[in-house]
Amino acid sequence: MLKGKTAVVTGGTRGIGFAIVKKYLENGANVAIAGSRQETVEKALNQLPEYKDRIMGIWPNLSSPEEVADAFHSVKEKFGSLDILANNAGVSSRTSLYDFTIEEFRKIMDINVTGVFVCSQAAARIMKDQGGGVIINTSSMVSLYGQPSGCGYPISKFAVNGLTKSLARELAKDQIRVNAVAPGVTRTDMVSALPQEMVDRISAGIPLGRVGEPLDIANGFLYLASDLASYVTGVVLHVDGAAMT
Ligand code: NAD
């Protein structure tokens, strides 16, 4: 479904991002894994030896326009284009408002919002020159309902939805589609570390009766990146088993 395309996946070293990387590779794309550190990027690359000709690693500071632009140009140089950007890197929080420090608030905004803005700008500049592309952001179910603690996290995901809808309208004239996937509770490291009893309790509250797997979310990223979604832009696709927090 993505043969000949090139994708950058931020936060691609583990969890949902790593599932997107694998899904895009299986579907023929070249993929650049963007992580926070060279060491974790190399660890992820080493897990995909069968795709070594179609993968590379980058580790720019996602809130630095210069570092991100340089890294994205190196991807275009290696593979010839940059067609898909999955803005997936993110950090969450459960801190109470009473204990929330300004440093923690700024860190969340820096990665979850500024990072998405900076990466979208750098990719859109390349995509516009190429005649089009696709940007897909990782939102969250908390962007609908908020959450009862850690308010910086839902605030950042409401902003991701705002960026998604605004950039979809602004970039449509350049044939760049912009969408988001909003996962529900998904079995990444954090959920895997919970006792089974707690996972069962969470699952019981989800209409489809289970937590999401990274593959469920990656399938949404594949659909939105592919030509099957050629007339879809400005959408926040909820992949959450109809969960409501
Ligand atoms: P994770 O913690 O397993 O992975 C997060 C990824 O982001 C990692 O690869 C990490 O290296 C990267 N990252 C964090 N800070 C970074 C930085 N400063 N620079 C570059 N990369 C950085 O989490 P995950 O569950 O796979 O989360 C991926 C995305 O999905 C996030 O945006 C998260 O908000 C969202 N999400 C997750 C869930 C869930 O239940 N797991 C639910 C809804 C939304």
Image: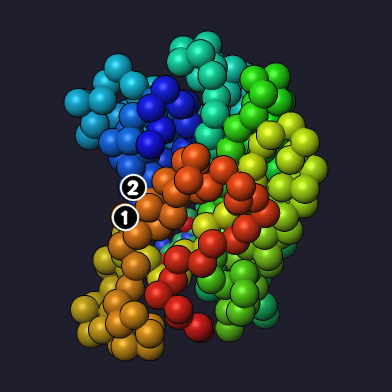
**At which x and y percent is residue 118?**
69, 37
Residue type at numbered disc 1:
Leu
Residue type at numbered disc 2:
Ala
- Which residue shows up at 28% across the image and 36% down it? 26
Q: Find residue 234 and report its image quarter.
A: bottom right
How much space separates mark 2 and mark 1, taking CA atoms? 6 Å
Left or right: 121 as drawn, with respect to 61: right
Tell me the residue that label 1 is attached to: 215
Q: Is residue 44 above or below residue 203?
A: above
* Residue 127 visible here: yes
Q: Which mark is residue 19?
A: 2
Left or right: 229 as drawn, with respect to 97: left
Q: Earlier in the sequence, mark 2 or mark 1?
A: 2
Q: Is residue 111 above or below residue 54?
A: below
Query: Label 1 crowding class (10 Å Cα cut-off): few <14, some 14-19, many 20+?
Result: some
**At which x and y percent is residue 169?**
77, 48
